[in-house]
Image (tube, grey):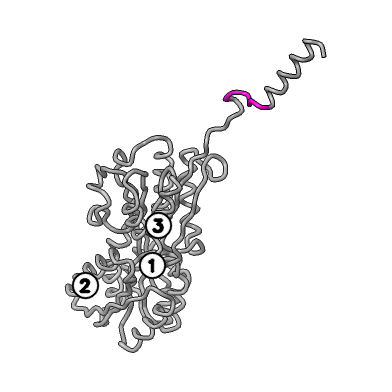
Amino acid sequence: MRRRDFIKVIAGSAAAVWPLPARTQQPPVPVVGFLNAASAGGYAPFLAAFLKGLAETGYVEGRNVAIEYRWADGQNERLPALAADLVQRQVAVIAATSTPAALAAKAATTTIPIIFELGSDPVELGLVASLSRPGGNVTGVTQSNIEVAPKRLELLHELIPTAKLIALLVDPTDAANANTTTRDVQAAARSLGIELHVLNASTDRELDAAFVEMVQLRAGGLVSVGGSFFTSRIKKLASLAVRHAVPAVFEHREFATAGGLVSYGSVVADAYRLAGNYTGRILKGEKPADLPVEQATKLELFINLKTAKALGITVPLPLSGRADELIE
């Protein structure tokens, strides 16, 4: 073999063994850990809103960001292990959507950035030092669904002023939300001269039993606290309320459109969009400690007039005038 041909062979072999420099190497795709206490099926619109917020910062799932989803399927006791798994996988940021998920994520890491979405007070929960200066590795977005729970009782009282016993439905496994809501709604009930009976439900069987007990108590109506368990069962809650002829107030529009009497609360999808936006900003290099807690403050009121008529309830004109939508 001539010397020139030999050099060509050696050069070709080297090219096969040693890749071309950096122009052929792609930067690693960041991984977001998405942690939620519920199941994916009931959260499709909220997840879509989260991805929309993420895209607003230039990150699109499957293109330049990957997402590791961890759903507890309503079993909050699974959240610590799911959070620990995301930490072990060294994700770039954890999006902890729901109060139990946020608490589990904070307990799992003090270094990986955490973006929460929840309805409770994050300062009271110990997630952040303050809303304006979160400190540490945690910040996020709050909506007002826990905060306005007493207002739901007031709406029910406005619709049924003669009701003296009202039931409050809470998920005892979501202790932070359950305790705060029970305290605040109890205070509102006392001011209105209403007896409040607290019912617990964290499984479908317990949810069915709660409505049976409500009927046996002859409760004049039902107020339900927010939380991932109930949010993922909006249609079931509406169906039970219709079947047992219970005037009920919940937090999401879907409750009223599915046959529930009234829904009143924050636009949760907007809070998820803001959480997605914050997640993208963290991926771009911003620090949680420098991002103040965002608050999704818009509230919406929906009244199902067809259900009101079936229950023999006359909706006062001032109340119907305040509604964002009357469902007929």
Q: For the residues carrying marks 2 and 1, which lies nearer the camera in this image?
A: 2
- Let me know if residue 192 appears in the view: yes
Write the residue at 43% across / 53% down: 85
Residue 84: image quadrant is bottom left
Q: Amino acid at mark 2?
A: Gln
Residue 178: image quadrant is bottom left
Q: Which residue is mark 1?
A: 263
Does label 1 or label 3 sit earlier along the sequence?
1
Q: How far is mark 2 from mark 1, CA to CA?
A: 20 Å
Q: Amino acid at mark 3?
A: Val
* Residue 149 or residue 92, whichever sits in front: 92
Does label 3 or label 2 sit earlier along the sequence?
2
* Residue 124 or residue 299, whichever sits in front: 124
Residue 228: image quadrant is bottom left
Q: How far is mark 3 from mark 2, CA to CA?
A: 25 Å
Judge whether 102 appears above or below 55 on screen: below
Q: Residue 69: x and y, percent?
A: 49, 54
Q: Is residue 167 left or right of residue 190?
A: right
Q: Is residue 235 magenta?
A: no
Q: Which residue is mark 2?
A: 186
* Residue 92 or residue 63, whichever sits in front: 92
- Magenta span of residues: 17-22
Say what secondary structure mark 1 lies in: strand
Q: Is residue 20 magenta?
A: yes
Say what secondary structure mark 3 lies in: helix
Q: Which residue is mark 3?
A: 268
Q: Residue 111: x and y, percent?
A: 34, 43
Asked whether the beta carbons under mark 1 and mark 3 sit within 8 Å of each other, the answer is no
Write the residue at 54% across / 45% down: 61
Q: Residue 75: x and y, percent?
A: 41, 67
Q: Is residue 210 left or right of residue 89?
A: left
Say what secondary structure mark 2 lies in: helix
